[in-house]
């Protein structure tokens, strides 16, 4: 970062501090997202199962939220200096083993994909937790190697091997969406960490070429890509989900049809409570509702960057990069979810963080928010310390 940009950044941070503690704003934004999500999940699933009023999904969602709140509190209580000292190699090995469990007898196949593991009657999606593990590992690596990231071997090659292992395990499930989210977040963290732009551009070019090749190797992905370009060409086949999503958003217009008044959730739009939640928000609350949700996610990203910048200003490189990476991976997934629902991106199964129905998604999202609280507290308590 050059001196002018750094001066602007520091000046911006001073203005933000006048507005109050970022932890308070973070709590407000997360509470708003979780609250809206709970209402919309209930609305999206209230008619499932052929009952007049189906409370089953709301009850499960509430239980997931309760568990998520405990996880958030536990992670927020972690000492960041302890987390920084922990050997990240063990974390990396553990998450790779967890990802590999989907290919064993513990793996559960749903809709043709082996993305879940069943442990003691509890079904978990390892890719959701892999996102957080990846951010922690690469924040630690970039912080430790900050003085030599200009070298291609250090700044790109070493990172590429580990990122490639993540991508391979996810693509074998297959989980193309999670792969894109993790790789994109790693790229942003590399940029923020100080990797040379030319090296980063080359690595992005190579990864894009490989992902394109992988995309065209699988016929169903080619069909998805073609249907994304013109879903109306096959509205009852490959384009069905996107067509139903667009109908929902179009019906909502600016101000929505009214809370609970969605028609598409009545067995027309699959996965309305998780992968297509933003479409139901658009139908019932309109474009204004979608804008409000996206504004909350934008605020979440801004707060994560503020928390990260405050840590970096005090020399806490691991904390700063971890906060920024955590904010990026949450908001980037929300952006992809919205892009899929609105037809801007090819259809893929990705939840809306902190809002969609799904235990693994909520637990990992809450853990990510817990990291932001822990980092902010660490920076505040050690604001007089240096490294």
Image: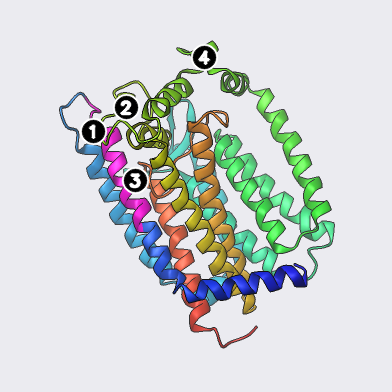
Position in image of residue 224 (x %, y %): 57, 22
Residue that label 4 marks: 232
As measured in the structure, the alpha-carbon distance from the residue carrying label 2 to the one carrying label 1 is 9 Å
Q: Earlier in the sequence, mark 3 or mark 4?
A: 3
Q: Quadrant of residue 367?
A: bottom left
Which circle's residue, 2 or 4, is located before the other in the chain? Answer: 4
Badge number at residue 265: 2
Marks 2 and 3: CB-CB under 8 Å? no
Regarding mark 3 in the picture, which secondary structure is present there?
helix
Q: Residue at x 27, y 34 (%)?
A: 258
Q: Is residue 276 left or right of residue 239?
A: left
Secondary structure character of the magenta stretch overall? helix
Q: What mark, if any, has residue 46 been given in the picture?
A: 1
Looking at the rendering, the stretch of residues picked out in magenta corresponds to 31-49
Q: Residue reaching furthest bottom? A: 384
Which residue, given by chain and number where applicable, does mark 3 sit on? 37
- Tell me if label 2 and label 1 are in contact, CB under 8 Å: yes
- Tell me how far mark 2 sits from mark 4, CA to CA: 20 Å
Q: Is residue 362 visible?
A: yes
């Amino acid at each position: 970062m050059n001196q002018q940009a750094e001066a602007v950044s520091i000046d911006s941070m001073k203005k933000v501090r006048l507005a109050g503690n970022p932890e308070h704003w973070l709590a407000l934004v997360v509470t708003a997202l979780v609250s809206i999500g709970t209402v919309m999940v209930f609305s999206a699933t209230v008619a499932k199962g052929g009952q007049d009023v189906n409370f089953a999904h709301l009850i499960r969602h509430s239980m997931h939220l309760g568990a998520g709140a405990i996880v958030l509190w536990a992670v927020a209580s972690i000492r960041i200096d302890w987390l920084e000292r922990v050997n990240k190699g063990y974390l990396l090995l553990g998450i790779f083993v967890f990802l590999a469990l989907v290919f064993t007898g513990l793996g559960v196949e749903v809709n043709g994909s082996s993305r879940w593991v069943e442990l003691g009657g509890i079904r978990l999606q390892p890719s959701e937790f892999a996102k957080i593990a990846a951010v922690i590992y690469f924040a630690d690596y970039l912080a430790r190697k900050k003085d030599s990231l200009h070298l291609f071997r250090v700044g790109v090659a070493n990172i590429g091997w580990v990122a490639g292992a993540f991508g391979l395990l996810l693509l074998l499930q297959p989980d193309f969406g999670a792969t894109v989210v993790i790789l994109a977040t790693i790229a942003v963290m590399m940029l923020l960490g100080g990797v040379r732009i030319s090296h980063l551009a080359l690595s992005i070019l190579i990864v894009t070429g490989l992902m394109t090749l992988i995309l065209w190797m699988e016929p169903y992905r080619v069909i998805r890509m073609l249907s994304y370009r013109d879903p109306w060409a096959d509205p009852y086949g490959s384009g069905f989900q996107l067509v139903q999503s667009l109908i929902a958003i179009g019906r909502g217009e600016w101000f929505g049809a009214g809370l609970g008044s969605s028609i598409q959730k009545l067995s027309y739009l699959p996965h309305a409570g998780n992968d297509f939640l933003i479409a139901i928000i658009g139908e019932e609350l309109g474009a204004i509702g979608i804008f409000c949700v996206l504004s909350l996610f934008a605020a979440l990203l801004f707060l994560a960057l503020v928390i990260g910048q405050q840590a970096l200003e005090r020399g806490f490189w691991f904390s700063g990069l971890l906060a920024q990476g955590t904010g990026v991976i949450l908001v980037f997934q929300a952006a992809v979810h919205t892009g899929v629902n609105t037809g801007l991106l090819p259809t893929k199964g990705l939840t809306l963080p902190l809002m969609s129905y799904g235990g693994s998604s909520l637990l990992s999202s809450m853990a990510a928010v817990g990291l932001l609280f822990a980092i902010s507290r660490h920076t505040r308590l050690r604001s007089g310390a240096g490294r």
